[in-house]
Image (spheres, rainbow, N blue to C red):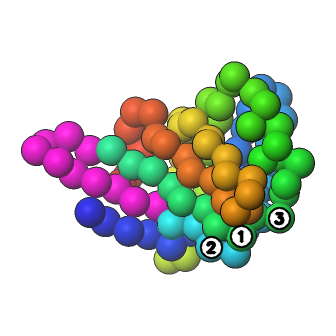
Amino acid sequence: METYQLAELSIMRGEETTKLLFAKAQLYVVTDTGYRLWYIEIDGMSQTALLHDFEESADLRVELTGATAGGRALAGTGFLHPNTAHHAANIRGDGELPGF
C-alpha cells in the first residue's frame, strides 16, 4: 500500500466545483494480486453543510482534482461518503487514478 499526504483537494458535482477545507487528507493506493484500488480519507472538514448535503443525496459521485504534499497532481472519479458527526469523509475511487 502506498500513502500520500494531500495538500489540496477539490470536487466537482454537476456543474459546481468545491475546494475542500480539511485538517488532514491522505490518499491510499492499494495493489492486491495485480488489481489496484484507491481511496481518500479526509479529517477535520469544516464544511458541514456540504457533508449534510451528501448525507441526504442518493448521488455520491464526484470528479476530483488535487495535489499531494510533494506537488504531484491527481484527478479521478469517486464516491464521497460523509461522516458529518466526525467532520470527516472518505472518497472511494472509481476506476484508475492516472499517475498513481
Residue most extreme to the left: 33
Q: Which stretch is magenta?
A: 27-36
6 or 90: which is nearer to us? 90
| Nearest-to-viewer mark from 1 and 2 | 1
Residue most extreme to the right: 49
Q: Is residue 23 visible?
A: yes
What quarter of the picture does the C terminus occupy?
bottom left
Residue most extreme to the front: 85
In the image: residue 17, left or right of residue 29: right
Work out whether 41 lies above or below 68.
above
Residue most extreme to the top: 58
How far is disc 1 from disc 2 in space, using C-alphas? 6 Å
Main secondary structure found in the magenta portion? strand
Task: Tell me what residue is drawn at x 26 percent, y 44 percent.
Answer: 36
Q: Which mark is residue 46?
A: 3
Q: Are marks 3 and 1 in contact (CB under 8 Å)?
A: yes
What quarter of the picture does the N terminus occupy?
bottom left
- Which of disc 2 and disc 3 is earlier in sequence? 2
- Which of disc 2 and disc 1 is earlier in sequence? 2
**Rendered location of residue 39, percent (x, y):** 45, 50
77 or 73: which is nearer to us? 77
Q: Amino acid type of disc 1? A: Gly
Work out whether 70 lies above or below 17.
below
How far is disc 3 from disc 2 in space, using C-alphas? 11 Å
In the image: residue 29, left or right of residue 72: left
Label 3 CA crowd tier, 10 Å (few <14, some 14–19, many 20+) = some
Label 1 CA crowd tier, 10 Å (few <14, some 14–19, many 20+) = some
Q: Which residue is mark 2?
A: 24
